[in-house]
Image: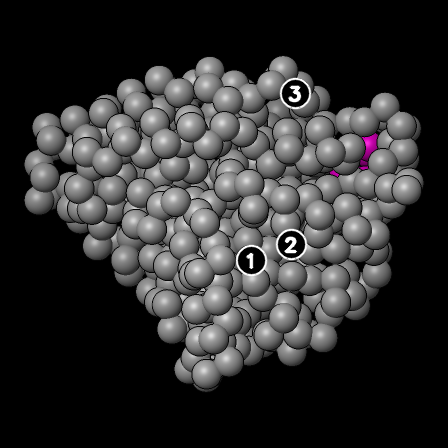
Amino acid sequence: MTHEFQPRQSTAVFPMGYYFTVAVLTALSLLIRSIAVADYKYPYHDPYLATATSAILSDNGATPRVDSTIVHVPGLPGRNRLPTLEGRGDVSLAFYRQTGAAPLLFILAGLGSSPYFGVAPYLASLFYREGFHVVILPSPMSWNFALSASRSGAPGYVPEDARDLYDVMQKTLTALRARYDVKTTSINFIGVSLGALQGAYLSVIDAEAGKIGVDKYLLVNPPVDVAYAVKTIDEWRGLKEKFGRERSQEIVSKALAIVDSFAEERRDNPVVFERLAKKLGGFTREEFQYLFAESLQSQLPELVYVTQVIHDQKLLMAPKDDIRKRLEEAKEFTLSKYNQMIAVPRWQNQIGDPQADLDTFTRRGSLAPIVNRLRNNPKVHILHNADDFLDKRKSIEALKDALGDRVTLYPYGGHLGNLWYSENKEYAVNFFRRRAGFAG
């Protein structure tokens, strides 16, 4: 496989969730939100700037670097021998190991995320230093997962992706115990963005099957309305035409240069984020929107390419052995185009319903069908931001209203922009340390 299939770093993580709506915000949730505004000291009230601060999150620059081990677990039968993908059919994970028995934390980030850079290793480093074994799972919307673990070969339908993830988690635990003699005192899960929605379905599956026995789930910024999110991202991607090719390239280059300039900075120092915010303050709102859309789209061509190797739907016209040209063709796919032309036909086959359309899968894969299961499961807690621009504020507040104390709603932070903030980090660590199998 050529180097194009190595995951590329994104400047932000974006969700891909599904439509969910309940009642409008009640007087009680209004009261809760007003109290949060008064008490929450997160400094960035512009959701775009807040989100952009997450661009420098990674496992480097903050205290001595924590090294992980790359672990490969067996993928689906036959996937290791596909043309142009030979030998790449195993699931690849990053594993951070404690020397003795410890609680284990699975981390699942968002669309097209990598186990080796970005938000996931940032969280892994945080929890490893708190005494956890850590495993970073590949996003189901990554080419590696599509190839090695997705039975449909076209991930994106959350209930089925969660079942595929559940199988991967079982295989991973078996491998860690057999190869590394890993001893666990509890099993836990944190999901962010799309990974949070998938984690919600994992909680339902494990409650029914009990094959893993996950002790606690923390779900951060789960998507509420996928139709709104995808429409928004498609519109933002269209800003490239408004800016023109040259200015678009300049915007991306400027953003990457700023991120690179913080490569050796500490991610536990608020002053670093103050300096970052000042440098990012030169971008307009539309430029931020374009950058976020480009970040999301950057991982999609590899996914499209792999889906067509698994099940050729005659959507890429270049010769099958011309990887570079097929990848160039794949760059023309948006998330909407991926869903309509690649995913829906495969999902119809997967569930045996040729009449089901995208709206049907959207409803079936939302939070709505499992909201009662989440409300009644004391293992599950959700963190969300009221100003997450990839959902309507009314939908986020309705989620809080529907799930009550199962949701903590922050007034600011955009989309994952407050993961690094001390109050949020402390909440997450304390959430898992309680009943996590620590002595004392």
Q: Residue at x 83, y 55 (%)?
A: 213
Would you identify the image quadrant in which residue 394 lies? bottom left
* Relative vertical location of residue 297 with respect to residue 97 in this rendering, above or below: below
* Relative vertical location of residue 185 with respect to residue 231 in this rendering, above or below: above
Residue matched to label 1: 383
Span colored in magenta? 172-177
Real-space CA distance between mark 3 and mark 2, rounded to the nearest whole angstrom: 23 Å
Would you identify the image quadrant in which residue 276 lies? top left
Q: Amino acid at mark 2?
A: Leu
The answer to whether the residues at label 3 and label 1 have Cβ atoms under 8 Å apart is no
Left-right relation of 339 to 255: right
* Relative vertical location of residue 313 with respect to residue 376 in this rendering, above or below: above
Q: Amino acid at mark 3?
A: Val
Real-space CA distance between mark 2 and mark 1, rounded to the nearest whole angstrom: 7 Å
The answer to whether the residues at label 2 and label 1 have Cβ atoms under 8 Å apart is yes
Left-right relation of 185 to 402: right
Q: Is tag 2's residue or tag 1's residue first in the polypeptide sequence?
A: 2
Q: Position of residue 277 (x, y in %)?
A: 32, 34
Report helix, strand or loop for mark 1.
strand
Real-space CA distance between mark 3 and mark 1, rounded to the nearest whole angstrom: 26 Å
Residue matched to label 2: 218
Q: Is tag 3's residue or tag 2's residue first in the polypeptide sequence?
A: 3
Q: Residues within 10 Å of mark 1 (few under 14, many from 20)?
A: many
User: Which quarter shows the C terminus?
Assistant: top right
Looking at the rendered structure, which numbered label has been put on residue 66? 3
Report helix, strand or loop for mark 3.
loop
Q: Residue at x 85, y 23 (%)?
A: 99
